[in-house]
Image: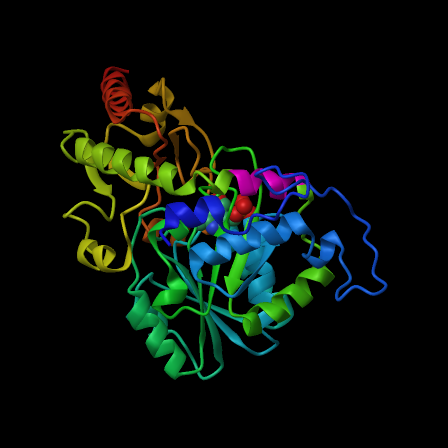
């Protein structure tokens, strides 16, 4: 079935009263005698948690998954479950700053060696030593939208016995399925597109039953599970995921093209533009190019000057909502990344990142044009 159909129908638990939606099972206590499993919210196996996992597993072509209280809970639990003292983790530079910070600050305390490489398949593979166990990256990557060749990366890593974990938050399960391209695990900050309305914090990790089992086991010890009400809200949100993302992609290409023409814009990063260095690759591994783009303004303009003049587009952290948002990665998503690493990714005072919502493209472009003009006159 198509993604839009799966997003609506898969995973739904039957309502004994005949309603169309999965009922909200708020319980934290379940009988266990004569039952095949002990149900408990922190064990990730309540009906509302399972309904969401089944829906996302269908969209990502996964066998199993764990629904967590945040994207970072999903990422940290997945990585820790598959890394041991003495193992090497290779991370792509430019990933979300919170993931970067967790890898830099937390994993070395467990004896895990963390190495960084450019967000490029060859560079990531070249950084792998004999003790390399996991490669972790995003594609498109945050915030400069580099695209990594997943099929190549995964086939080479697999031949060396290295697991590949992909953060698919920017692409969404509607546009890209890393497991189908050979990745071992896929993670999402469901706080973003999957939730889609800027009112939920959630995360998920999906993969084979074999690779998910130790993640669930560790997650149960660490305790980052989700309550039933949030899971039910998330299940409702996913029903409109495909249609939201379709509109967000249409708006992103329209905004990217308009910005590319603007004399005060130095460059636009969007995989859908033919000027993007990995445009052809993105075309082969993504169904569309997503709702995320970034652009650099030319001095004397600065990102902040422009951001402060926006009227319709909200200046806000986070992304993937129905409303278009804009932020300076250097002050938000990448604030915790060491300055030299940010500089090497071109994450500085000239860079703005946009997450397009589902409004009308012309209104977004008009707002950006007026903000650039006002900034110039300031
Ligand atoms: C690409 C990406 N991955 C992971 C995360 C972390 O997700 P959460 O904030 O839900 O913990 C974020 C948050 O901004 C993100 O942008």
Residue 159 image offset from top left, x and y in percent: 37, 83
Range covered by the magenta-colored residues:
229-236
Q: Is residue 234 magenta?
A: yes
Residue shown at 38% from the left, 50% from the top: 3
Q: Nearer the viewer, residue 193 or 39?
A: 39
Q: How is the image coloured?
A: rainbow
Total numbered labels placed on residues in the image: 0
Residue 177 image offset from top left, x and y in percent: 37, 59
Residue shown at 29% from the left, 72% from the top: 152
Q: Main secondary structure of the magenta part?
A: helix
Left or right of residue 170, residue 366 in this image = left
Q: Name the quarter where the C terminus is drawn.
A: top left
Residue shown at 62% from the left, 47% from the top: 14
Q: Nearer the viewer, residue 14 or 240?
A: 14
Residue 374 image offset from top left, x and y in percent: 26, 16
Q: Is residue 125 magenta?
A: no
**Picture quarter containing residue 125?**
bottom left
Residue 351 in sight: no
* 355, above or below 6, in the image: above
Residue sitting at the far right: 33
Q: Name the quarter where the N terminus is drawn.
A: bottom left
Residue 59 in sight: yes
**Picture quarter containing residue 166?**
bottom left
* 8, above or below 32, in the image: above
Residue 25 image offset from top left, x and y in percent: 71, 43
């Amino acid at each position: 079935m198509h993604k839009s159909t799966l997003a609506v129908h898969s995973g739904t638990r039957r309502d004994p009263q005949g309603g169309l939606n999965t009922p909200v099972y708020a319980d934290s206590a379940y009988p266990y005698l004569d039952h095949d499993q002990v149900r408990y919210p922190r064990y990730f196996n309540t009906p509302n948690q399972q309904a969401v996992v089944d829906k996302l597993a269908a969209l990502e072509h996964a066998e199993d998954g764990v629904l967590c209280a945040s994207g970072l809970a999903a990422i940290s639990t997945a990585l820790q479950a598959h890394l041991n003292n003495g193992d090497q983790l290779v991370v792509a530079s430019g990933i979300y700053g919170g993931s970067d910070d967790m890898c830099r600050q937390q994993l070395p305390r467990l004896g895990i060696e963390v190495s960084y490489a450019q967000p490029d398949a060859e560079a990531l593979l070249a950084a792998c030593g004999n003790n390399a166990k996991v490669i972790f990256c995003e594609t498109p990557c945050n915030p400069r939208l580099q695209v990594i060749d997943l099929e190549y990366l995964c086939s080479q890593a697999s031949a060396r016995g290295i697991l590949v974990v992909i953060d698919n938050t920017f692409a969404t399960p509607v546009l890209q399925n890393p497991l189908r391209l050979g990745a071992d695990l896929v993670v999402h900050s469901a706080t973003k597109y999957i939730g889609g309305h800027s009112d939920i914090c959630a995360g998920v990790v999906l993969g084979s039953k074999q690779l998910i089992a130790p993640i669930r086991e560790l997650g149960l010890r660490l305790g980052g599970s989700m309550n039933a009400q949030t899971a039910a809200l998330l299940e409702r949100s996913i029903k409109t995921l495909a249609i939201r993302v379709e509109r967000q992609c249409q708006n992103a290409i329209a905004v990217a093209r308009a910005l590319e023409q603007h004399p005060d814009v130095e460059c636009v990063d969007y995989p859908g533009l033919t000027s993007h260095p990995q445009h052809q690759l993105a075309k082969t591994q993504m169904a569309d190019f997503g709702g995320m783009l970034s652009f650099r303004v030319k001095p004397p303009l600065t990102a902040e000057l422009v951001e402060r003049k926006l009227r319709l587009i909200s200046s806000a952290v986070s992304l993937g909502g129905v409303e278009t948002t804009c932020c300076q990665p250097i002050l938000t998503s990448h604030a915790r990344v060491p300055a030299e690493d940010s500089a090497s990714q071109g994450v500085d005072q000239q860079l703005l990142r946009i997450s397009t919502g589902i409004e009308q493209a012309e209104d977004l472009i008009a707002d950006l044009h007026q903000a650039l003009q006002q900034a110039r006159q300031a």
